Amino acid sequence: MDIKVQPMGDYQTNCYIVTIENKDFIIDPGVGALRWIKQNVTNPVAILNTHGHFDHVWSNKEVQDEYNLKIYTPKDDNFMLEKDPYGMGMPASCADVLIEPDEEIEIENVQIKFHHFPGHTPGCSVIQINEHLFSGDFIFKGTIGRFDFPNSDATLMKRSLNKILQWEETNFHVYPGHGEKTTLKSELPSLKQWETYI
């Protein structure tokens, strides 16, 4: 597996290209992502969204039109793709596949699990491909996503933290929506502190 990352736009939102057996999965194509994607893919097969915030899905439609790809989005966040609730002028897009909470799917013989961790947004999810977690705005290196935005929910964030703290397997690489990569094992102390604080 090969993982490429490029921060996009004013919020430096990480766009990922995950390549497995010559198949490119595009995760969270943010502002201006198409140019970088075109330089780094050979066989794109899908667009995966961790959640619906504008800085993660801004280029959904542009990338979809360029490569005729399906968009896979947590169902509880699809409204953000369509309605631009923050009024940022984001180009509208619409998921082709609405992902149920904690659903596991198969695309081109690759298993992908969307772990549902609401709080930052209603549909906020961590995308698992093998031992790699693409955590969107749920987990960052040393901290967690904000839960004071419109459509955020502190109670749900606390439940989500409790949920991931129950995982028996913690040997995962974590690729967040902003900032540097980390590991789930190294983030457990921070997650425990936040779960107690909220």
Image: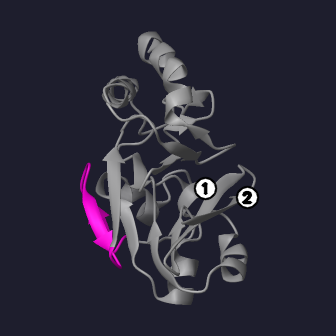
Q: Position of residue 33 (x, y in %)?
A: 67, 70
Q: Position of residue 17 (x, y in %)?
A: 59, 68
Vertical arrangement, residue 24 with respect to residue 191, above or below: below
Task: Determine the residue positioned at 39% across, 30% down.
Answer: 153
- Residue contact between numbered discs 1 and 2, judged by CB atoms under 8 Å: yes
Q: Quadrant of the C terminus?
A: top left
Which residue position holds label 1? 55
Q: Nearer the viewer, residue 146 or 89?
A: 146
Q: Quadrant of residue 168?
A: top left
Give the residue type that dot 1 points to. Asp
Which residue position holds label 2? 9
Labels in figure, total: 2
Q: CA distance from mark 1 to mark 2?
A: 7 Å
Q: Nearer the viewer, residue 33 or 115?
A: 115
Vertical arrangement, residue 59 with respect to residue 153, above or below: below
Please, what secondary structure does the residue beneath circle 2 have?
loop
Q: Quadrant of residue 141?
A: top right
Q: Nearer the viewer, residue 107 or 173?
A: 173
Q: Is residue 129 left or right of residue 87?
A: left
Task: Determine the residue positioned at 72% across, 78% down.
Answer: 35
Vertical arrangement, residue 113 with respect to residue 166, above or below: below
Magenta segment boundaries in residue numbering: 95-109
